[in-house]
Each structure stands twice: as C-alpha cells, then as structure tokens.
Image (cartoon, rainbow, N blue to C red):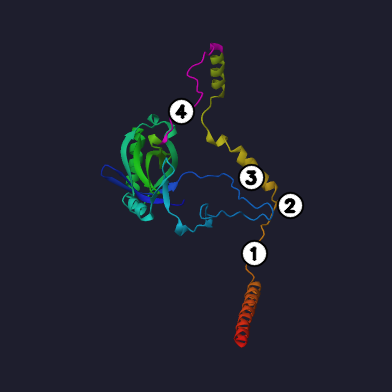
Amino acid sequence: MHTIWKGSIQFGLVSIPIKLHAATENKAVSFRNLHKKCHTPIKYEKVCPVCEESVENDDIVKGHEMNDGRFVVVDDEELKSLKEANTEKAVEILDFVHIDEIDPIYFNRSYYLGPDEGGTKAYALLRKALSDTRKVGIAKIIIRSKEQLAVLRIREETLLMETLHYPDEIRASADVPNVPSSENIEKKELDTAVLLIDQLTASFDPEKYEDEYRKNLLALIESKQSGENIVTPEKEKQPDNVTDLMDALQASVDRTKKTSASEKKKTTSKKSS
C-alpha cells in the first residue's frame, strides 16, 4: 500500500511514528474527450482571453478572488514560507470523545495509519486504550498545505484517521428551500410508514450493495471492445524536414531575387545619372 505521508501521532508525551495510507479509492469509470472527426484526444490549453495568447506555467500567478471581482495576488515564495511554518509532521490529538457525538456530515476522507519503524508497541497501546474506553481521538494534521481536523478511531485491527470538515464548511440546513416545518400526518399513514421501515430493517452488510451503474457501464465497454466500436486516434502530424528544407530554399531564392532586383535598379540609376 502506497505511503502518502510520514510523521507521528502525538498525545500527551507519547509519540508514535506512523505512515499514512489512503483507505479508499475512486472506481468511477473515466472517459477522455475525443475529436469526433479523427478520434484524437482533445487538448486543453491555458489561454488568456484578453491578450489572446497561450500562457506558459512560468507566466501564471495565484490570485484569490474578492467579492468585487478583483484579485489578491500571492506569490509562490509567500505560500512556500507559510507552508514551511506549518508542516510539522504530527497528528496532534487534542481531545477524546464518543464517536456518537459526531454528526456524520462532518466526515470527509478516510486514511489508514500504520506504525513506522519503532512505533509498533506505542501503536498497539493507543489502539488498546481507544478500544477499552470506546472513544475516538480528535486531532489536527496538515496534509497538502491544508490544516485538517480529524478523528482517530479503530477499524478492525488498524488505526483509521478520518478528516473532518470544519464547522464553517458545513452549510446551514435552514438554507434549504421548501422544507416543511410541520405537516398533519394521519396516524394510519404513520403506522404504515413505520411498518414498512420495520419490514426493510436489516443488519448493515456493505457486501450486498454494489454500484449497478458502474457494473453496467463496464459491461457495455467490454461488449464494444471488438469490431467497429474500437477507434484509433490519428497520429499528430510531425514537421516534415523535407518540406521545411524546401520552404527555406524557396525563401532564400525569393530573397535573392529581391536583392538582385534591388541591386540592378541601383546600377541602372547610377548609369542614368
């Protein structure tokens, strides 16, 4: 499993060297946009609409857009300095809480934490302590220049870290339009709804659920992998050295003709005078 971050878990005076691994993966089926005419993948170029010219990476700066449409420009050195000041490689546990107190809307992304060299015993100690107290750790960590709030919990025998949204990143449910405050629900209607819920109640077994759309999409792609459904993009035209040479020779000839004509005109003018 690929390591995406190395550091330590800090709680109290205890330090546990760890490695961070992505716990989930995106299995969405992706597509490339092709030119319908020749089936060549489309390129997306960076173009300035005002200057009407292509822009290279060296000519791009970062800007934060304000409400009035203007931008605050921040250069790479400033960002680098800020990043270096906040890149302590530690998962700092701030509090321990019961996981039932955390609304699932706060959960963002999951990572496995594995012990690094010399951290096995302390890793096992924290895992056992979390298990016995039935609590999770609330921590802070910096990943990809962003300070993240996170939960440390146990999944099977492994410590799992789930990043959390900050409160100001959660939109207010009161802003959702047309949500009824109350309705006159008939008892018979409610009893029927509760009965239906009881009939469909089961233990959660994630293995019985699957992405039907992705399954059918992959089946469609597999069925089209033979015959006329397969296309080969045309190769990009490479500069022809022979053509380039002929163009250069022709330009030289034309230039020589102009020079000769000019010199001949000057000579004629001198003789006339």
Q: CA distance from mark 2 to mark 3?
A: 18 Å
Q: Would residue 241 be found to the left or right of residue 20 on screen?
A: right
Q: Which amino acid, by three-letter code, is at mark 2?
A: Glu
Per the image, the residue denoted by label 4 is 175
Q: Which residue is mark 3?
A: 218
Count residues near mark 4 (Cα–Cα under 10 Å), then give few for <14, some for 14-19, many for 20+. few
Q: Give the quarter of the image for residue 92.
A: top left
- For the residues labelled 3 and 1, the Cα–Cα distance comes to 33 Å
Amino acid tagged 3: Leu
Residue 14 shows up from this direction: yes
Magenta region, residue range: 169-188
Q: Quadrant location of the C terminus?
A: bottom right
Q: Which mark is residue 228?
A: 2
Q: Nearer the viewer, mark 2 or mark 4?
A: 4
Q: Please tell me the numbered disc located at residue 237.
A: 1
Q: Residue furthest front?
A: 273
Of badges 1 and 2, the one in the foreground is 1
Earlier-in-chain disc, 4 versus 1 = 4
Q: Residues within 10 Å of mark 1 (few under 14, many from 20)?
A: few
Distance, label 4 to label 1, CA atoms, is 54 Å
For the residues carrying marks 2 and 3, which lies nearer the camera in this image? 2
Q: Distance from label 2 to label 4 (Cα)?
A: 51 Å
Q: Position of residue 162 (x, y in %)?
A: 41, 40
**Residue 53 percent location from the top left of the image:** 53, 57
Query: Foreground residue, 208 or 50?
Result: 50
Q: Is the residue 263 above or below the residue 213 in the image?
A: below
Residue sitting farthest toward the bottom: 271
Q: Amino acid at mark 1?
A: Lys
Q: Secondary structure at mark 4?
A: helix
Q: Visible in this render: residue 118?
A: no
